[in-house]
Structure formats: structure tokens, C-alpha cells
Amino acid sequence: MSRVCEITGKKPLSGNNRSHSLKATRRKWNVNLQKVTVMVDGKPKTIRVSTRALRTLKKAKVAA
């Protein structure tokens, strides 16, 4: 299961950790995904969405 928001398509970002000596090692910033149940065509469906998308869904009163 990939770490991708099913609503916005957000994916993990990558970059470098920087130590005090500025040595670079690779790291990843994962998306904060949450499982949420939404109504799709009158039926409940569990999807994985980012917390930012979840805030928007709750504001639109789509997600519980």
C-alpha cells in the first residue's frame, strides 16, 4: 500500500538530513494519512486521505 492521498494525490517528499557539520544523508517526509469512511454513491467506503484533505472534507460535511 503506497503512501498517497486518494483525494489530493499527495506523495512523500524527499530531501536531506543535515548534521551540524552539514553532512547530507537522505530522508523522507511522509504524508500524514488517515483512514476515513466517506459516502460514495450512497455506500460507505474507507479511503486513506491526508489530514489537510480530511479537514476540507469535514468542512464540506462529506466525511464523519
Image: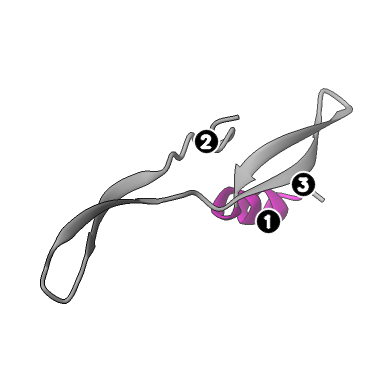
Mark 2, other Cα within 10 Å: few <14 / some 14–19 / many ≥20: some
Colour scheme: one colour
Distance between mark 1 and mark 3 Cα atoms: 9 Å
Closer to the chain start, of discs 1 and 2, is 2
Q: Please name the residue shown 76% across and 50% down the image.
A: 61
Q: Position of residue 62 (x, y in %)?
A: 76, 44
Residue 39 on the magenta span = no
Mark 3, other Cα within 10 Å: few <14 / some 14–19 / many ≥20: some
Q: Position of residue 45 (x, y in %)?
A: 81, 30
Q: Please name the residue shown 61% across and 52% down the image.
A: 56
Q: Is residue 18 above or below residue 39?
A: below
Which residues lie in the magenta part?
51-62
As drawn, the residue found furthest toward the bottom would be: 20
Q: Please name the residue shown 46% across and 49% down the image.
A: 30
Q: Which mark is residue 59?
A: 1
Distance between mark 1 and mark 2 Cα atoms: 21 Å
Distance between mark 3 and mark 2 Cα atoms: 18 Å
| Mark closer to the observer (1, 3) | 3
Residue type at mark 2 is: Val
**The N terminus lies in quadrant:** top right
Q: Which mark is residue 40?
A: none
Residue type at mark 1 is: Lys
Residue type at mark 3 is: Ala
Q: Which mark is residue 63?
A: 3
Q: Which residue is mark 2?
A: 4
Asked whether, in this view, residue 29 is left or right of residue 33, the answer is left
Specify the principal SS of the magenta part: helix
Q: Position of residue 60 (x, y in %)?
A: 69, 49
